[in-house]
Image (cartoon, rainbow, N blue to C red):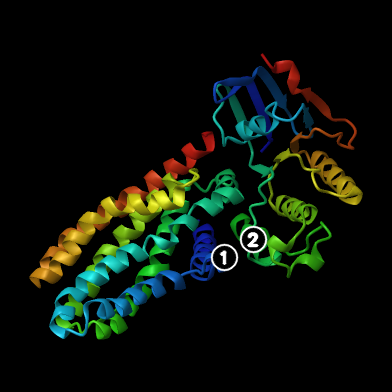
Amino acid sequence: MIRVLTALMWRDLRNLLFGSSRGGAVLPLLFFLAVAMLYPFAVGPDAPLLAKTGGEVLWIAALLAAILPLDRLVQEDIALGIFDQLNLRGVTEEIVMVVRLVAHWLSFAPLLMLACLPAAALLKLDGETLYLLLLGLLAGTPGLAAVGLMIAALTAGLRAGAALSGLLLIPLALPILIFGAGALERGDPATLGFSAAISLLLVAITPFAAGAAIRAGREG
Amino acid sequence: MQARLAAHDLACRRGDRVLFRGLSLSLEPGDVLHVTGANGIGKSSLLRILAGLLSPYAGTVERDGAVGLLDEKPALDPDQPLSHALAFWRAIDATPGTNYPWDIEHLLDVPVHYLSTGQRKRAALARLSAQIAPIWLLDEPLNGLDHRGVSMAAAMVGSHSRAHGICVLASHQPFPLDGMRVLELAEFVP
């Protein structure tokens, strides 16, 4: 079992980080930094305003950056027949989805949190805001990754799946955003507990929902 | 363990059309079954039902032994060199060694999406032969293969059968192997 998990994880990380066809993990990162760079140009060099709203803008940027990798998260492997072959070898879709969830999170969240450092400098965020932002992303990004994977699996068979998945992610990710960005407003890390709780719930149900979606897709 | 593959009174429905019904079969070690029929008659669906990937509309399938499936999806990562794409399945299957009997040594460094249809089929057959599965389900195994490839595929199925394996192959073209049972799927169309 460990051998199978290692092979799956290795392949997923390689495809998600360096997948050449869609720009890999670099594209969401550049998107996130682009928002941080453009925002000061849009609102002007008003340091107090930037510092007051910058954290929330980075939250929105992180949420939207999480949409970018969705269309290649599940769809390609269904087309390749990877899940079929794994199923025949006794590796259930749920196990594959647990590994994919971890790999998906690893391929975008740590990079995004690292990119928060230059972004915080661009937006003149103070140390405490940056701390709350990073803590919030740590609590919220597993949930974002889970929602994204669930939606990617559900929309995999649809022709307009890529566009639809972006739209579907927004309402489902809303609670994470509200509590994550809300902590910045109040300056209170306790609010992040809610964000983490929602994340945990989403992480717990996603492998089952996504696995069931892939199995149901075979019958279509 | 003795491999066995049996199906009782299978029916398959796609959309609102029943493709076939009342299909029963029982295969013992060494059996090779050639499923024939026109395009769209349900050969691939039958194989996917036998593999357990599709649930039958009616009937049951009994399987004893691991299943190896070869269909039009190669299950090899397109942007990886062939050796890496095959190595993934070797790691999953825990099969040692790296010699492929499919004349693909010179392709191992080539990314999979550069391979031709026939080369990709050879690679998929190499993946299948590296997997230790007593039950083989082959969907159009000859598509894209040249004359040499066709005879190699026949020899491979032959030696699998002699090694007490079971093989069900769906193909609209003749398969050059003696001693096969034939299932004409048209007989089961309602």
Q: Which chain carries label 1?
A: A
In-front residue for pair A79/A32: A32
Query: Considering the image in quadrants, where does the N terminus of chain B appear?
Result: top right
Q: What residue type is labelled 1?
A: Ser
Q: Can residue B66 be seen in this view?
A: yes
Q: Which amino acid does label 2 sit on?
A: Pro
Between circles 2 and 1, the one closer to the viewer is 1
Pointer 2 residue: B78
Q: Up-down: is B161 above or below B128?
A: above
Real-space Cα separation, disc 2 to disc 1, in angstroms: 10 Å
Q: In which quarter of the image is residue A123?
A: bottom left
In-front residue for pair B12/A39: A39
Q: What element carries label 1?
A: helix
Left or right: where A116 falls relative to B32 = left
- Spot occupied by residue B182 in the image (x, y as percentages of width and height): 81, 25
Query: Considering the image in quadrants, where does the C terminus of chain B appear?
Result: top right
Q: How crowded is mark 2: few (under 14 residues within 10 Å), some or many (20 or more)?
A: some
- Spot occupied by residue B131 in the image (x, y as percentages of width and height): 68, 51
Q: Up-down: is B95 above or below A23?
A: above
Q: Up-down: is B54 above or below A25?
A: above
Q: In which quarter of the image is residue B111?
A: bottom right
Q: Quadrant of residue A109?
A: bottom left
- Give residue A21's mark: 1
- Spot occupied by residue B77 in the image (x, y as percentages of width and height): 62, 60
Residue drawn where x is 18% and y is 60% of the image: A178
* Residue contact between numbered discs 2 and 1, judged by CB atoms under 8 Å: yes
Q: Mark 2 lies on which chain?
A: B
